Image (cartoon, rainbow, N blue to C red):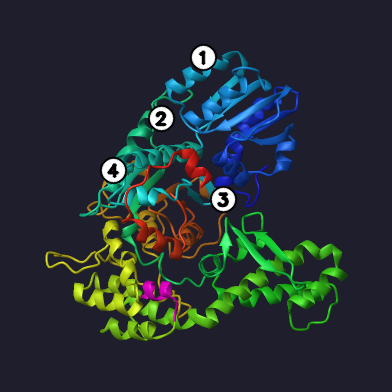
Amino acid sequence: MATGADYGLPKLVWKRISDTIITDCRKSEVWKILILEPFTTKLMSSCCKMSDLLSERITVVEDLYKNREPVPEMKAIYFMPPTTKCVDALIADFKTKPKYKAAYVYFTDYCPDELFNKMRLYCAKYIQVCKEINISFMPQEAQVFTCDNPGAFRSIYSPNSLDKTKTLDTLADQLVTLCATLDEYPGVRYKKDSTMENAKSLAELVDTKLSRHYELDDSGKKKEKTQAQLLIVERGFDPISPILHELTYQAMAYDLVDIHNDTYTYKSKDGAEKQALLNEDDMLWVKLRHKHIAEVSEQLPKMFKEISASKKQPDGKITISNLNQMMKKMPFFRKQVTEKTIHLQLAEDCMKQYSNNVEKLCKAEQDLAIGLDVEGVKVKDPMRTLLPVLLHQYSTYDKIRAVLLYIFSLNGTTDENLSKLIQHVKIEDEREFILNWKELGVPIITSSTSLFSRKPNRRDRSQEEKYNLSRWTPVIKDVMEDAVENKLDTRDWPHQSESPAAWNGSGAVSARQKHKASSQDERRTGSRLIIFIIGGISFAEMRCAYEVTQAVKSCEVIIGSSHILTPRKLLDDIKSLSKRPVEPLTVEERSSA
């Protein structure tokens, strides 16, 4: 059984694992050991629980790279990427004295012949099963995936990179396994850019590898294109969205609160440190994550009052102390109250940061990003908007974010003006925070040869705006809606390979039109739109995939990248682009990083 939401990528991944690894396990009654390395450990954790494995007679999960005690009476399942390090670790388990009775070997992707032959040479008689199951991506959420490779940003965009070509090739392989898991053979398009070639290169690689993968299907016939499109775009296409302060719950929490590996650490009323995992097993998190913080702050106390009323508790002010009392008196509701307590605490942490610093920043950021103030009047002098931010005691990172939004709003600034801004922020020795955006194709210094503005035409969303400090909409949402409505200009979005003609206009409905929420099964009968952003995705862009999917009956939007961004992490990555070259990381080293 898949965890979390009752649909989506984790469920599909678990189904594929069930149909291969688990089905093979059921053929043998003996208990087995599951051996994983860092990537497959994360992969399994994203789609199943230990109880799911126990029910399938998998009694222990071990680390491939750690010293393990031999259990010669048990069979071992190896689930791992097809790398030299993994295969060598497998061989070491059987080469001299076998650690296990037999091996069931499952690779996440295509295993090169030399590795397969090496494995066969040393331990063929112990291997009962050897299969490639084509899952080398990470299902982060129902409609979000990553390639679990934050280092791809530096590999692709650093001028000193030693492994750009190899990284793009690996990303292409991972995208093919995503399509295979979805059972899609999509048409591939990319965003054309006069200064950057990565999207085009990746589109070519993916299309070639998809064609090779689908040469023959199970029936022996060549698989035809399915009702899906894959769009590939570079991070520099929209530099604003990952830099802005977002006020929706998930994006705000990851930006302002200390959350590591999706784990939120907080202190309970008695001062004890506690941890909460923010994932799709927490259905309250799923319900609240894309809502504006104002709605979250309003809804959480109401939820507590409902619990309180149901147990005839007095409707006092909701505080952490009161909740502790409620938990003691209502054992039946303990889990429910615990979930709500976590989110009340997290929402309070977000609002504390918001009240202290972010509220005043947001108005300036929104005006700079959109180019209009709250009244819809054009911002004629962006420097007047920026100056109060520079003069206030904001953190250096917040000032850098504001300066970047100012520069983006002008499509670049003069060398002289940039030097003054850098002095204001006091980052004379760390100019790379700003200058290195040029490596993403984003104009920083105004060029006299620039004949056109890079700014895309935006949809008018003035009627949709509900909050003055959340007027910006990520550019990728426009792209999603245009793709669904078949309005993407082929001059800007060339076809690397086309989808069937049926995509064009099939069930095309305005993504802004409101519909009754359709069931996921109904949506699967329509088309899929897969978006891949080279260089990382922001939480705001992830939210857009859900919003467009909810608004449109005919299409499910899935979005992914090499990794998920937070504003601070992106700025640190940008700064590090100009560092001297380092040895490229292997898949294993990336996984353990």
Type of amino acid at the residue the image marks with label 4: Ser
Type of amino acid at the residue the image marks with label 1: Leu
Which residue is situated farthest in the left direction here? 449
Callout 1 secondary element: helix
Q: Position of residue 288 (x, y in %)?
A: 60, 66
Q: Position of residue 298 (x, y in %)?
A: 63, 78
Label 4: few (<14), some or many (≥20) within 10 Å?
Answer: some
Mark 3–mark 1 distance (CA, rounded to whole Å): 47 Å
The circle on residue 520 is 3
Answer with mark 1 or mark 4, whichever residue precedes in sequence: 1
Q: Is residue 575 magenta?
A: no
Question: Do tag 2 and tag 4 residues touch (Cβ < 8 Å)?
Answer: no
Answer with mark 2 or mark 1, whichever residue precedes in sequence: 1
Above/below status of 349 relative to 99: below
The circle on residue 201 is 4
The circle on residue 121 is 1
Answer with mark 2 or mark 3, whichever residue precedes in sequence: 2
Write down the region rendered in magenta.
394-402
Callout 2 secondary element: helix
Q: Residue at x 46, y 23 (%)?
A: 115
Callout 3 secondary element: helix
